[in-house]
Image (cartoon, rainbow, N blue to C red):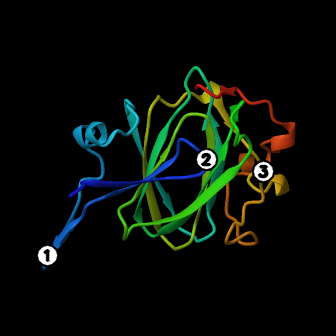
Amino acid sequence: MPILNVESFEILGPLLITPKAHGDSRGWFCETWNARDWAETGLPDVQWVQDNHAFSAAPGTTRGLHFQAPPHAQAKLIQVLRGEIFDVIVDLRKGSPTYGQTLWITLDAKNHQNFFVPVGFAHGYQTLTTNTQVAYKVSDYYAPDCEGGLLWCDVDLNIPWPKPDDVVMSGRDFTWPTLANFDTPFDQGT
């Protein structure tokens, strides 16, 4: 019986990983990340160096669309610990057949799923519930000089945000460029 169920998408690279949960009358237990299981399942060999934990009080809290550029580009492994989010990525890999395309999924605390976002993608999410908590691993340390982003509401990205009129977000997230005005720092091989 597989320990991890792995789903891929039309955009190559991102993966939805569902670990096996073991439940009984007390509740449940699952391993959300295990290096040996990742290797045996054939998942990308990623060296995680930092764990982040974000809390959002209000539904509609929107974070993104963010990335960290080379030489400190980050892959991410996202998991919802409490609540539910609408999670979005945008392919920014120059030369990729899916450059500029978006992918969105809903993640919640009940399914124990992890969303793997490789290097070369902008990432963001919107909370759908109160008091949402999101944890994520990253493959490089925070480097403020390498921060970047795309405008979350860029009409060319055609992202169907569930709460477009109830957005709570950082002021800088309104200042990122649109995809049409963006020069990507990512090659397809990064």
Q: Is residue 85 above or below residue 135?
A: below
* Quadrant into which the C terminus falls: top right
Q: Is residue 81 above or below residue 118?
A: below
- The foreground one among 11 and 135 is 11
Read off the residue under disc 3: 174
Callout 1: SS: loop
Q: Give amino acid for label 1.
A: Arg
Count of numbered marks: 3
As drawn, the label of residue 26 is 1
**Inter-mark Cα distance, 2 to 1:** 39 Å
How far across and how far down the image is residue 49, in percent? 38, 31
Residue at 13 percent across and 79 percent down: it is 25
Q: Residues within 10 Å of mark 2 (few under 14, many from 20)?
A: some
Q: Quadrant of residue 176?
A: top right
Q: Is residue 131 above or below residue 52?
A: below
How far across and how far down the image is residue 7, in percent? 44, 55
Compared across the picture, whether 143 is left or right of 140 comes to right
Callout 3: SS: helix
Compared across the picture, whether 57 is left or right of 88 comes to left
- The foreground one among 178 and 167 is 178
Residue at 66 percent across and 25 percent down: it is 187
Read off the residue under disc 2: 11
Query: Mark 2 vs mark 1: which is more N-terminal?
Result: 2
Q: Residue farthest to the bottom? A: 25
Compared across the picture, whether 35 is left or right of 12 comes to left
